[in-house]
Amino acid sequence: MTDNVYVGNANVDSAMDRGWLLGHFKPPSEVRHSKDVEIKWGVHPAGDERAQWVTGEYRTALLILVSGRFRVELPGRSVLLAEQGDYVVWGHGVDHSWRAEEDSVVLTVRWPSVPGFSVT
């Protein structure tokens, strides 16, 4: 059944939906539509940072460094991801922000995929 298969390239597809490749915001007819999880391929130039902290979060997130140096700010803690494969997980209720210290590529997995949240 080929209707239930999607083949793409994260670098190309990430240009749409601000890097998010999978989640509730994809058309319901697509295999990339999910109410359970969101996946983002984030390509960030050095110095790129989140405009403001995410607050009131009630999803869980996993952020994995693919390349570069990437800093995740959490309440009372700063986490530097410097080696390929370094990752951080935070749960509901944990505010966060981030900054690319070098040109960086990160993969973010966030769950559940909650309608009403913007694609950011």
Image: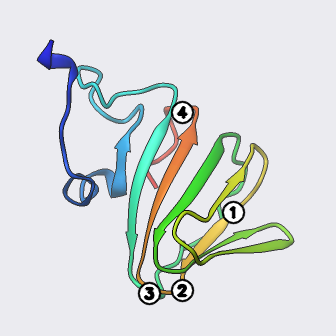
SS category of the residue bearing label 3? loop
Q: If you read the primary sequence from the N terminus, does the residue marked by circle 2 or circle 3 appear first?
A: 3
Q: Amino acid at mark 2?
A: Glu
Q: How many marks?
A: 4
Q: Nearer the viewer, residue 109 or 74?
A: 109
Please name the residue shown 31% across and 51% down the image. Answer: 17
Q: Amino acid at mark 3?
A: Ala
Mark 2 = which residue?
101
Q: Is residue 42 left or right of residue 65?
A: left
Mark 1 = which residue?
96
Q: If you read the primary sequence from the N terminus, does the residue marked by circle 4 or circle 1 appear first?
A: 1
Q: If you read the primary sequence from the N terminus, does the residue marked by circle 3 or circle 4 appear first?
A: 3
Q: Is residue 3 left or right of residue 37?
A: left
Mark 3 = which residue?
46
SS category of the residue bearing label 4? loop
Dots 2, 3 in contact, CB < 8 A: yes
Residue 48 horizontal/vertical position (percent): 46, 81
Colour scheme of the rendered structure: rainbow
Q: Mark 3 or mark 4, which is nearer to you?
A: 3
Q: Quadrant of residue 87?
A: bottom right
- How many angstroms separate mark 2 from mark 1 (CA)? 16 Å
SS category of the residue bearing label 2? loop
Q: If you read the primary sequence from the N terminus, does the residue marked by circle 2 or circle 4 appear first?
A: 2
Residue 65 horizontal/vertical position (percent): 52, 66
Q: Judge the density around disc 4: few (<14), some (14-19), many (≥20) Cα neighbours within 10 Å.
A: some
Mark 4 = which residue?
114
Residue 45 horizontal/vertical position (percent): 39, 82
Dots 1, 3 in contact, CB < 8 A: no
Q: Amino acid at mark 1?
A: His
- How many angstroms separate mark 2 from mark 3 (CA)? 5 Å
Q: Amino acid at mark 4?
A: Val
Please name the residue shown 41% across and 31% down the image. Answer: 24
